[in-house]
Image (cartoon, grey):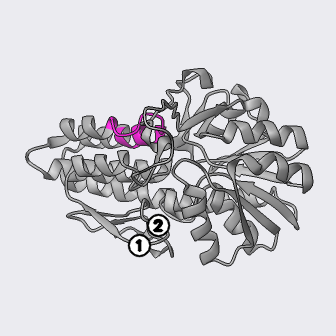
């Protein structure tokens, strides 16, 4: 079992013959683990939001490939194909699959694949801890911060990206208050981020997504801290829908904006955010809530689940290799290579 399992919150547990995923659709009411024994089951879990968060999706995909190779009816190519289709925007998924394919090309054994998947998991935890130290160092004591969606241990191999920075900054005595958005339509902030920060006694307050401008107009917010699902070569960043809006509001009210993501989130083959594919999910995620209709029957809906924040609105991108401030094509390449 990977050392990441030592973290208090374990979103993914590798049990060698199967992958156990904490079903994040049921939190905070229930803590239930779903078992995946095939690549198809792992892909379905990724698509259906059992596991979410770009780093965790990449880790789950790597383990899914191991399961696919062990399953005689799937094999490497079929497993890779079904996993690649599960979520289009999170580049970590494709980065992990490409890394696993490289290992398979050199040493086509289950043992080699499993070792690489565990390595990806362990590296993610180490990267989280490094990013947390770098990001926390940017936060002055007594700061108030706002975060969006869930970027904690639930979304990663352990500790978290943006929420990992918040967790470490709190431990260092730097935070006076944390605000987190509810994050419609899946309510990752209300269900998951709130659950994580309450477990650790971090001073948090939940706000509606639409309350951010009101909050910043009435109270000084020092940093907005978010994660990322894909970062283009120029620093444009795709993240949970609503992130772009928060960046615009932060710029207006003088709050700094920090993106926290590991190196695997950068897509240097994508010149700008215009080239990032944006996943659009079913309209019922907006028109219904847990099976109950909340909009009139027949109402159409637009449901993009990510948006792109221009690099010009971002003060710092923190990855395990360093801090990119401000993000530009040259500064991204200088740190990420």
Q: Residues within 10 Å of mark 2 (few under 14, many from 20)?
A: some
Residue 168 falls in image quadrant: bottom right
Mark 1, Cα crowd under 10 Å, few <14 / some 14-19 / many 20+, is few
Q: Quadrant of residue 259?
A: top right
Highlighted range, magenta: 84-97
* Viewer-side residue, 150 vs 302: 302
In this view of the protein, which residue sits in the foreground, 153 or 117? 153
Secondary structure at badge 2 equals: loop
Q: Report the front residue among 112 and 237.
A: 237
Q: Residue 181: percent from the left, percent from the top?
A: 67, 55
- Residue 91 highlighted magenta (yes or no): yes
Number of callouts: 2
Q: Are marks 2 and 1 in contact (CB under 8 Å)?
A: yes
Q: Dividing the image into 4 quarters, which one contains the N terminus?
A: bottom left
- Residue under pointer 2: 27
In three-dimensional space, the C-alpha distance between marks 2 and 1, rounded to whole angstroms, equals 6 Å
* Residue 212: percent from left, percent from top: 77, 49
Residue at image point 26% right, 34% down: 81
Q: Is residue 283 left or right of residue 267?
A: left
199 over 189 or under it: above or below? below
Is 164 contained in the magenta span?
Answer: no
Of helix, strand and loop, which one carries label 1? Answer: loop
| Residue where numbered disc 1 is placed | 31
Look at the image and tell me in which quarter the C terminus lies: top right
Where is residue 34? Give x, y as percent: 30, 64
| Residue farthest along the left direction in this orientation | 72
**Does residue 234 sit above or below 214 in this rendering?**
above
Asked where in the image residue 208 lies, by quadrant, the reply is bottom right
Query: Is 149 positioned to the left or the right of 6 in the image?
Result: right
What mark, if any, has residue 120 been given in the picture? none
Comparing 202 with 264, the one in front is 202
Q: Residue at x 22, y 56 (%)?
A: 111
């Amino acid at each position: 079992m990977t050392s990441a399992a030592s973290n208090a919150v374990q979103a993914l547990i590798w049990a060698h013959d199967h992958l156990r995923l904490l079903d994040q659709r049921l939190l905070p009411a229930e803590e239930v683990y779903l078992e995946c024994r095939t690549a198809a089951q792992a892909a379905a879990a990724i698509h259906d939001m059992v596991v979410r968060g770009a780093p965790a999706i990449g880790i789950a995909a790597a383990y899914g490939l191991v399961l696919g190779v062990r399953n005689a009816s799937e094999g490497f190519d079929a497993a890779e194909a079904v996993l690649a289709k599960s979520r289009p925007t999170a580049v970590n998924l494709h980065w992990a699959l490409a890394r696993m394919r490289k290992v398979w090309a050199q040493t086509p054994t289950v043992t080699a694949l499993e070792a690489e998947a565990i390595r990806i998991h362990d590296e993610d935890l180490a990267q989280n801890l490094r990013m947390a130290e770098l990001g926390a160092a940017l936060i002055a004591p007594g700061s108030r911060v706002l975060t969006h969606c869930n970027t904690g241990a639930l979304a990663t191999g352990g500790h978290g990206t943006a929420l990992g920075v918040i967790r470490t900054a709190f431990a260092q005595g730097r935070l006076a208050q944390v605000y987190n958005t509810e994050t419609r339509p899946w309510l990752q902030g209300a269900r998951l981020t709130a659950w994580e920060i309450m477990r650790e006694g971090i001073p948090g307050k939940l706000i509606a997504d639409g309350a951010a401008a009101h909050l910043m107009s009435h109270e000084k917010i020092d940093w907005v801290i978010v994660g990322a699902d894909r970062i283009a070569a120029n620093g444009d960043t795709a993240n949970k829908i609503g992130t772009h809006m928060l960046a615009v509001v932060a710029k207006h009210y003088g709050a700094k904006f920090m993106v926290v993501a590991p190196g695997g989130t950068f897509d240097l083959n994508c010149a700008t955010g215009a080239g990032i594919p944006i996943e659009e999910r079913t309209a019922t995620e907006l028109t219904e809530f847990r099976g109950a209709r909340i909009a009139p029957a027949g109402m159409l809906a637009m449901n993009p689940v990510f948006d792109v924040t221009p690099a010009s609105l971002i003060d710092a991108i923190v990855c395990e290799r360093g801090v990119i401030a401000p993000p530009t094509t040259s500064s991204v390449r200088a740190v990420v290579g």
